[in-house]
């Protein structure tokens, strides 16, 4: 018989510490993708990491599993198989959702956006899994207020918005046209 293969999804499914991640990957319809050829590098938050999120967060994300939940999960995956020893002291990497994350590796400790790798280099036939102690979130899209505040050409507008309190309004969900 052919040799049995192990995928990054198999590691998650067979772990007692990743039941929430398993449910999320299945709900987001990513199990098939992450069981594919890859290779993938998965930074896998534990159940305790999900439990540390504000109450109701996981439940809310599961209401739209192929939206924000899928985006957050893909923010935990790199294309390619990256072992912990292959990492630079500090580097920016682009995750599968298209957003960047910062990975640091110093003195045997690997971190991604502040989450610590607690178990590194679990190799599979389609990649590698690194267990992390926190759920990492993609950066939020900038608001109109952020764009104005970051612009050197709009200091007067920024000052006017700040003095009238409209900066707080424009920091909200909108939609707005300025």
Image (spheres, helix red, strand yellow):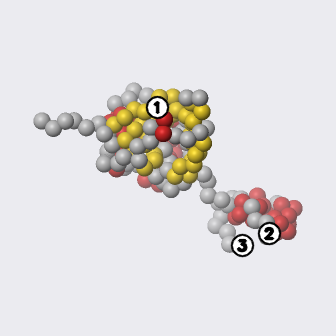
Instruction: Please report whichever mark, 2 or 1, sits nearer to the chain's N-terminal start.
Output: 1
Q: Secondary structure at mark 2?
A: loop
For the point 85% across and 68% down, the residue is 156
Q: Note whether residue 85 is visible.
A: yes
Counting from the top left corner in percent of width and height, residue 73 is at 47, 46
Look at the picture and state if 43 lies above or below 30: above
> Depth-wise, is mark 3 or mark 1 nearer the camera?
1
151 with respect to 62 (left or right): right
Mark 3 touches mark 2? (CB < 8 Å): no
Counting from the top left corner in percent of width and height, residue 32 is at 32, 48
Q: Secondary structure at mark 3?
A: loop
Query: Residue 120 shows which numbered tag?
Result: 1
Give the spatial CA distance, label 3 vs label 1.
47 Å
Residue sticking out furthest to the left: 1
Give the spatial CA distance, label 3 vs label 2.
12 Å
For the point 79% across and 70% down, the residue is 153
Counting from the top left corner in percent of width and height, residue 172 is at 69, 59
Crowd tier of the residue under label 1, counting other residues whose Cα lies within 10 Å: few below 14, some 14–19, many 20 or above: some
Counting from the top left corner in percent of width and height, residue 166 is at 79, 63
Among the 4 quarters of the image, the one containing residue 158 = bottom right
Residue denoted by label 2: 154
For the point 45% across and 37% down, the residue is 83
> Depth-wise, is mark 3 or mark 2 nearer the camera?
2
From the viewer's side, name the closer residue of 8 and 110.
110
Query: Residue 147 shows which numbered tag?
Result: none
Give the spatial CA distance, label 2 vs label 1.
46 Å
Crowd tier of the residue under label 3, counting other residues whose Cα lies within 10 Å: few below 14, some 14–19, many 20 or above: few
> Depth-wise, is mark 2 or mark 1 nearer the camera?
1
From the viewer's side, name the closer residue of 122 and 18.
122
Residue denoted by label 3: 178
């Amino acid at each position: 018989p052919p040799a049995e293969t192990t995928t990054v999804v198999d590691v998650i499914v067979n772990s007692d510490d990743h039941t929430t991640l398993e449910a999320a990957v299945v709900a987001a319809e990513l199990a098939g993708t992450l069981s594919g050829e890859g290779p993938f590098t998965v930074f896998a938050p534990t159940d305790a990491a999900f439990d540390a999120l504000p109450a109701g967060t996981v439940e809310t994300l599961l209401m739209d599993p192929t939206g924000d939940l899928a985006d957050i999960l893909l923010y935990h995956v790199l294309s390619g198989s990256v072992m912990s020893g292959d990492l630079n002291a500090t580097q920016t990497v682009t995750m599968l959702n298209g957003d960047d994350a910062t990975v640091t590796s110093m003195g045997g400790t690997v971190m991604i956006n502040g989450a610590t790798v607690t178990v590194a280099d679990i190799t599979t036939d389609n990649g590698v899994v690194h267990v992390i102690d926190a759920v990492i979130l993609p950066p939020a899209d900038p608001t109109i207020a952020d764009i104005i505040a970051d612009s050197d050409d709009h200091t007067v507008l920024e000052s006017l918005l700040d003095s009238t309190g409209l900066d707080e309004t424009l920091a909200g969900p909108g939609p707005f046209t300025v």
